[in-house]
Amino acid sequence: MNLQALDRRIAELRLDGYIQYAASSFTANMYYLTAFLTADPFLFLRSNNKSLLVVSGMERKRAASSSFVDEVRSRDDYLQGSRRVETENATAGLIASVLSADHIKRVGVDDAFPIGLADALRRMGYDVQPLSGLIEQQRKVKSARELKLIQEVQHACETALDSAIDVLRRSKTVDEELHYSGATLTSERLKTLIGCSLIRQACSAADTIASSGKDSALPHVAGTGPIKAHSSIVLDIFPQSVESRYRSDMARTVARGEPQNELFEMYEAVLHAQQVAFNTLKAGITGAQVHAAVEDHFRQMGFHTDLKKGYGFIHSTGHGVGLDVHELPFLSQKGDTLEPGNVVTVEPGLYYPEIGGVRLEDVVVITRSGNKSITRFEKKLVI
Amino acid sequence: MNLQALDRRIAELRLDGYIQYAASSFTANMYYLTAFLTADPFLFLRSNNKSLLVVSGMERKRAASSSFVDEVRSRDDYLQGSRRVETENATAGLIASVLSADHIKRVGVDDAFPIGLADALRRMGYDVQPLSGLIEQQRKVKSARELKLIQEVQHACETALDSAIDVLRRSKTVDEELHYSGATLTSERLKTLIGCSLIRQACSAADTIASSGKDSALPHVAGTGPIKAHSSIVLDIFPQSVESRYRSDMARTVARGEPQNELFEMYEAVLHAQQVAFNTLKAGITGAQVHAAVEDHFRQMGFHTDLKKGYGFIHSTGHGVGLDVHELPFLSQKGDTLEPGNVVTVEPGLYYPEIGGVRLEDVVVITRSGNKSITRFEKKLVI
């Protein structure tokens, strides 16, 4: 972790330091800054170009061995004796005792810093200034190491998806549903299959999507019940590595048994929309331009969108992926200029309540001259 | 969801309403208030005893069908026309346009509300007041429905743990390590086994602990490499139901192949410590009293604790469990008075670097006269 940008910002704003108080298991910035993983909140302090963690006594040794910070102390060091600061908010008291030990009065925090703590510190005379999006901006540009970690998760995605596609290929259409090894093939069975494959690859996978038929017309419906034949089946997987905490994200749409013509047309249009994005994506272009190009494409192909009624191309073209599944930069109306090292999904989709949904999602790395896909999985509607 | 306490607090403080802006997948309060699950932040507004969600256009239908709020609107409704509020912070602009449409000026928020948003709203003239711990206090007391959901996850825990114990029982000691079906039995294999069992039961399980030997002396080390024979093996599982989002939490310590005498003594002391807690736990008692009783017990049994050096009984006796794995009430130094319907873990442990760790963790429900365990799994050191 290179904290130069943070140190520069602290100096520019004449702050004494920067603090975070969060649980790194749930707050990507905290994990990014510390490389120490825990489900309980702890304190990170950056000041004088040095990093300090203050954790529970039980976690001190583990934090010292896993984190790259300069120093790890136990919160017990501050809860007794002359260092202790008494106040109505125990956490604010702990933070104040840490700050006062280093004569720190003015601190930067993330936009997401809790207002309860900030107000308590302000009442105690501390100047608490949100540094809007500072860490998020840095997280946007991936290092070679981060890229490799995302690729590893993407590889796990594809292995897991492969096992689901394999089961779909071996399933039979019985009336309008799919059957596999003697029983109805359900969304639940597909999600279990994908989940176990990911677990075996040391990834966790909550909220996998395996929806079919009209359910697939709502992009974030996870799917329940029998998988429909002659219809679109949307599989969307976004696991996280248990070890590295990095993520990837991919989606494929398939059909088992010949579907209606409209679905083929939607599929072709979405496939082309991806190509439009791939041809546009490079450093210097904004995410908004890419999204507009994809919107234009769908319009030209005659696919209508109504956001209020919820049909057509109703979500953005893509989003950054890294420690969070949705992070900067965005390929949407509000998308900023892309830089080399950005990692984004390209996931155009079309959704019509009477037909279903089609979404294809790959992950690409932005380069100076274009982009490079890290997703290799085949694209084929009828399997 | 009974929002009477929230409505009362809004009235008492003469606020016009209460807002949350968060992603319910990662913010338990948001899921608790809305029953709508998404990985992207959205707005919840409570005012005039009614609840409103403002979500992305793509999510409107899904939110309307899954949430119990009174009304769901699309953020697109506010981003155009006369309702639109222009400001440097787009999210604050959206919130301001929602609030101004209902003539709301004074709002309560959670302690965890992001400072960036709160400051932006305050600069726009809104009064933003953190209502410390209001929703968390309500979440402490579980309804019959919530209790049933936690029990279901606990059942999944026990099925998963059973499969791991079964493999341990069938493993062989080869030198100082365990072997199973022709290969070294590793922490990774045990965690995969537990994870797949949980996935099959529609639970997700990140960060399962399966540590052995000296690794187990650090309570939150997840474990890597071969499982040691003649030594403590700590298995700690805290899954979440994919559907209900509730959690449970359990731990067992076992040994395969006769361990050293000290481990038996530690195990007996931890088993007794649980009994001390079970005998003390009831409504009206504080979590601090329970924790002190367990500390006393270990002291009387001659087990020394040094928080700085990190050995002995170095964590709290327990914590609430529900939508979060660690929530109120706490059985620790800062633990408040317990109420009927609280659900807490009872997980005393002893940790010595030269020997390893022992932890036993059950979940109990607090009643008027005592407590009732929802954990049934056997306790036996040598298996």
Image (cartoon, coloured by chain):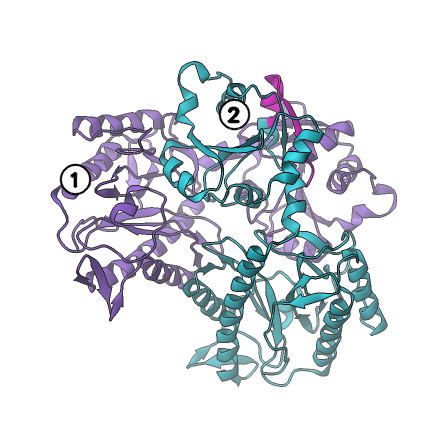
Chain colours: A cyan, B purple
Numbered range of the magenta stretch = A118-133
Residue at the (58%, 47%) spot, across then down: B24
**Is residue A127 within the magenta segment?**
yes
Q: Secondary structure at mark 1?
A: helix
Position of A201 compared to A296: left or right? Answer: left
Is the N terminus of chain B in the top left, top right, bottom left or bottom right quadrant?
top right
Residue B268's disc number: 1
Q: Is residue A138 visible?
A: yes
Residue B262 sits above or below residue A292 on the image = above
Residue at the (34%, 33%) spot, across then down: B316
Whether residues under marks 1 and 2 lie with C-beta atoms below 8 angstroms apart, the answer is no
Q: Which residue is mark 2?
A: A95
Residue A164's spot in the image, x, y percent?
50, 74
Residue at the (56%, 19%) spot, across then down: A103
Labels 1 and 2 positioned on one and the same chain: no
Q: Nearer the viewer, residue A98 or A201?
A: A98
Residue at the (79%, 54%) spot, across then down: A333
Position of B27 compared to B172: left or right? Answer: right
Instruction: Residue type at mark 2: give it.
Output: Ile
Residue B101's spot in the image, x, y percent?
80, 38
Q: Nearer the viewer, residue A74 or B4?
A: A74
C-alpha gap between disc 1 and disc 2: 39 Å
Is the C terminus of chain B in the top left, top right, bottom left or bottom right quadrant?
bottom left
Subunit ID for the residue under disc 1: B
Instruction: Residue type at mark 1: give it.
Output: Glu
**Is residue B335 within the magenta segment?**
no
Q: Nearer the viewer, residue B77 or A65?
A: A65
Position of A349 compared to A221: left or right? Answer: right
Q: Is residue B284 visible?
A: no
